Image (cartoon, rainbow, N blue to C red):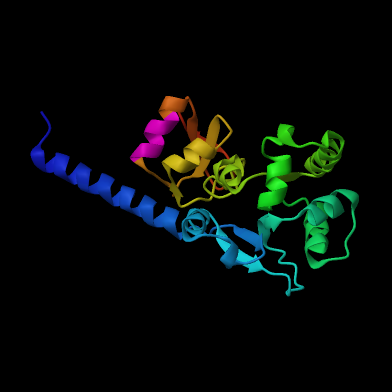
């Protein structure tokens, strides 16, 4: 039977590591999300949802700069004018210039259509009389999709994989991380998670690696695998 004092010491160490994991997670910088239009176009609850995952920056119709740090861009209250110009490649307005700039840069873009446009291209447009015209607009939407632009509702953007815990889902776990957390293990697409000898592994990270069948491999300064047993445990 384990000594009570030893058990208490183990619990204290685990709690310390878990606390460090929480601090490390909260200290990680959030990627920049550029919102074209202004904060006035978002209700407080929407803004709160965005700010949990992103560093939100704004660009309205009077600003001419193109933030290069943006990892994603959303156009609020997007009009039919922007939809058509974006698909055709016309850049005679501030918004259309921004759209073209970020399309060329390969930045993920979402157009959140205005209420009237949303009814046509996102809603039940079967009640519309001129089906040919509706079909024509939907072709512009499909063209933008080919360019990497999503025309979607705000709720759809919030629920998309892009909006989950930063936009770094496919990034490998760095071998130089100071702390390996459960989130890191889940995000890593590789079966082997490489860490350095000084990396602290949280208990949840170790358990999650075991559950997912991933190996946590410790490497030395030369990149040589020191030890790992294939189950995420050492």
92 versus 177 height, above or below? below
Front residue (pair 130, 216): 130
Instruction: Answer left or right for 193 relative to 132.
Output: left
Query: Image point 43% across, 44% down: which residue?
Result: 181
The one of 134 and 140 positioned closer to us in this rendering = 134
Magenta span contains residue 109: no
Q: Is residue 16 left or right of residue 154?
A: left
Q: Nearer the viewer, residue 123 or 190?
A: 123
Q: Nearer the viewer, residue 164 or 134?
A: 134
- The reply to whether residue 19 is in sight is yes
The stretch drawn in magenta includes residue 208: yes
Please report the residue visible at 53 percent of the width from the left and 50 percent of the height from the top.
Answer: 176
Say above or below: 63 vs 6: below
The region drawn magenta spans: 203-209
- Locate residue 89, reporting x and y percent: 90, 54
Residue positioned 83% across, 63% down in the render: 97
Residue 182 drawn at (x, y percent): 42, 40
Residue at 37 percent of width and 32 percent of height: 207
Decide whether the magenta segment is chiefly helix, strand or loop: helix
| Horizontal side, residue 62 vs residue 91: left or right | left
Q: Is residue 126 above or below residue 49?
A: above
Name which quarter of the figure residue 90 lies in: bottom right
């Amino acid at each position: 039977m384990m000594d009570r004092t030893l058990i208490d010491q183990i619990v204290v160490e685990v709690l310390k590591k878990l606390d460090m994991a929480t601090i490390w997670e909260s200290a990680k910088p959030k990627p920049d999300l550029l919102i074209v239009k202004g904060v006035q176009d978002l209700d407080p609850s929407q803004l709160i949802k965005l700010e949990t995952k992103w560093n939100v920056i704004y660009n309205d119709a009077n600003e001419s700069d193109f933030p290069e740090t943006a990892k994603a861009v959303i156009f609020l209250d997007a009009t039919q004018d922007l939809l058509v110009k974006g698909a055709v490649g016309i850049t005679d307005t501030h918004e259309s210039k921004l759209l073209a700039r970020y399309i060329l840069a390969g930045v993920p873009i979402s157009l959140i259509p205005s209420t009237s446009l949303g009814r046509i291209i996102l809603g039940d447009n079967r009640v519309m009389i001129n089906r040919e015209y509706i079909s024509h607009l939907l072709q512009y939407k499909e063209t933008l999709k080919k360019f990497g632009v999503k025309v979607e509702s705000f709720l759809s953007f919030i629920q998309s994989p892009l909006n989950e815990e930063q936009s770094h889902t496919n990034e490998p776990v760095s071998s130089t991380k100071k702390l390996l957390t459960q989130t890191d293990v889940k995000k890593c697409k590789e079966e082997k998670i490489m860490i350095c000898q000084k990396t602290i592994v949280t208990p949840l990270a170790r358990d999650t690696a075991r559950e997912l069948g991933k190996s946590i491999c410790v490497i030395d300064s030369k990149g040589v695998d020191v030890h790992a047993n294939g189950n995420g445990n050492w």
